[in-house]
Amino acid sequence: MFTAVMFIIGYVESLLPPIFSVPGIKPGFANIPVMIAIYILDWKLAAAMSFTRIILSGFTFTGLFACIYSLAGAVLSITVMVILKRTGKFSVTGVSMAGGVAHNLGQVIVASIVVGKAIWYYFPVLVIAGLVAGALTGVVTGCILKINQRDGSVIEKSKK
């Protein structure tokens, strides 16, 4: 079910006009279920959900190259978020912000291989975008996690 929610949110985000007229920058709300899974379920399940959504979106909407960029971003992002979460020293929002920047870094690494090093001039803009999108996603995820904890782990009950 999480993957379906991510797929729908990702599709809705793809319909939005570019934020601040900067191409490729999205709020990243499709990553909220990934964050929830990292915190409540299992990082392997979170990764599987993310990869499944990216592949489905790639075949359905974005194409092969966008799929490759997104997969690179997801691998780096999930790795960074899992490591930071395990330290216990970062808030949900901090983990999400780092994940947003890591996702953009992964995409720029692949893009620099495909289109050349000039893409790195765009990276500072993507760092800011990753921090802002990560903060938004992290705040929403944090609120959902608090509600889930308060209401007796609604997400855990839905797994059964």
Image (tube, rainbow, N blue to C red):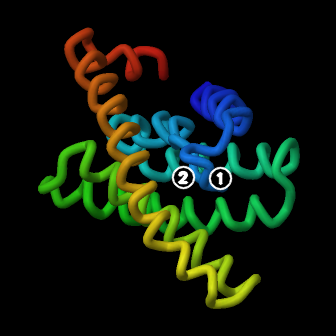
Q: Which quadrant is home to the N terminus?
A: top right
Q: How many marks?
A: 2
What amino acid is found at the position of numbered circle 1 in the picture?
Answer: Phe
* Picture disc at residue 122: none
- State the residue in front, 49 or 118: 118
* Picture disc at residue 51: 1
Against 72, residue 146 (above or below) is above
- State the residue in front, 76 or 17: 17
Are dots 1 and 2 in contact, CB under 8 Å?
Answer: yes
The residue drawn where x is 46% and y is 61% is 77
Against 156, residue 127 (above or below) is below
Against 142, residue 44 (above or below) is below
Alpha carbon of mark 1 to alpha carbon of mark 2: how far? 6 Å
Give coordinates of residue 36: x percent, y percent: 40, 35
Q: Is residue 63 left or right of residue 100?
A: right
State the residue lying farthest toward the left: 89
Give coordinates of residue 57: x percent, y percent: 77, 44
The residue drawn where x is 49% and y is 63% is 126
Give coordinates of residue 149: x percent, y percent: 23, 20
What amino acid is found at the position of numbered circle 2 in the picture?
Answer: Ala
* Picture disc at residue 47: 2
The secondary structure type at the circle numbered 2 is helix
The residue drawn where x is 51% and y is 41% is 27
Give coordinates of residue 87: x percent, y percent: 18, 60
Q: Classify mark 2: residues with Cα within 10 Å, few (<14), some (14-19) or many (20+).
A: some
